[in-house]
Amino acid sequence: MSGVASGLPEHPYPVNIDMRGRLAFVVGGGAVAARKVGTLLHCGAKVVVISPALDPRIDRSRVDWREKSYKSGDILAAGDGMAADVPFVVLACTDDANVNAQVVRDAQAAGVPLTNNVGDPAQSDFYNVAKIETDDCLLTVSTKGRDPARARRLKQELCEWVGGMM
Ligand SMILES: C[C@@]1(CC(=O)O)c2cc3[nH]c(cc4nc(cc5[nH]c(cc(n2)[C@H]1CCC(=O)O)[C@@](C)(CC(=O)O)[C@@H]5CCC(=O)O)C(CC(=O)O)=C4CCC(=O)O)c(CCC(=O)O)c3CC(=O)O
Ligand SMILES: NC(=O)C1=CN([C@@H]2O[C@H](COP(=O)(O)OP(=O)(O)OC[C@H]3O[C@@H](n4cnc5c(N)ncnc54)[C@H](O)[C@@H]3O)[C@@H](O)[C@H]2O)C=CC1
């Protein structure tokens, strides 16, 4: 599928971001949020989660969980008790497409630099990647937002290859 046809970029800009001490605001606390929160914590981010329920794989002692449904205005209040600023990253991770779309609109209006809607790459500033990390190496795989299951398979193949090399 071409980027033009799908509305996705042909050539996304690949980067590694220093998340240490930066505020990540996650809406929804389910299975997908659990994976993204795990990665954010691993990278040193401060994480706020807004969700009426929290997946047991999310470590409650390491996130600021606000046990409620998302409302417009929550993003600007996200820093309370943790940081004074607007979140650096917002992830819309609920199972409700309307809520996720509202989160994206609110984040853009609030001037959040990086927003991701896990259910709609066309409403995202960036896509999460599959990764293999060692002490001194980070290998990442992306299908430019088009085929996440393929990214996962490629990562598994790469893992076998790296395992043979390192
Ligand atoms: C656009 C993107 C947005 C983003 O998340 O940033 C996105 C979007 C979507 N994912 C969907 C489904 C699944 N995604 C996974 C897994 C991963 N997804 C990841 C990234 C991304 N997923 C971004 C683009 C990546 C790229 O560019 O290649 C990985 C690589 C990184 C990570 O999430 O950490 C991680 C593997 C990590 C690893 O293995 O290491 C699995 C497998 C599983 O959960 O076990 C399934 C189950 C279904 C299946 O198997 O197909 C759906 C359909 C939802 C639905 O409607 O049901 C959408 C929405 C859509 O595409 O429209
Ligand atoms: N990007 C990716 O890697 C993937 C994305 N998806 C997409 O992610 C969506 C979520 O999937 P799961 O996490 O498996 O769903 P889930 O059902 O496990 O979790 C949804 C979470 O959203 C919360 N929620 C619902 N309404 C809310 C609201 N108004 N405010 C705050 N929180 C709210 C729920 O309490 C729950 O914690 C799916 O609908 C699918 O579109 C699915 C698989 C992978």
Image (cartoon, rainbow, N blue to C red):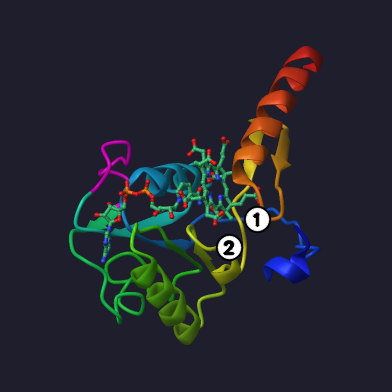
72 left or right, relative to 104 = left
Which percent across, then down, holds residue 13? 76, 62
Which percent across, then down, holds residue 31? 36, 43
Q: Is mark 2 within 8 Å of ligand 1?
A: yes
Write down the quadrant of residue 24 in the picture.
bottom left
- Label 2 – label 1 distance at C-alpha: 6 Å
142 left or right, relative to 46 = right
Which percent across, then down, holds residue 69? 21, 66
Please report the bounds of the magenta region as a residue range: 54-63
Within-10-Å neighbours for mark 1: few <14, some 14–19, many 20+: many
Give whichever of 31, 132 is nearer the camera.
31
Q: How many marks?
A: 2
> Looking at the image, is 137 positioned above or below residue 5?
above
Query: Mark 2 touching mark 1, by CB under 8 A?
Result: yes
Determine whether the residue tagged by mark 2 lies in a helix, strand or loop: helix
Which numbered disc flags the more N-terminal residue, 2 or 1?
2
Residue that badge 2 annotates: 121
Residue that badge 1 annotates: 145
Looking at numbered disc 2 in the image, what kind of residue is underneath it? Pro
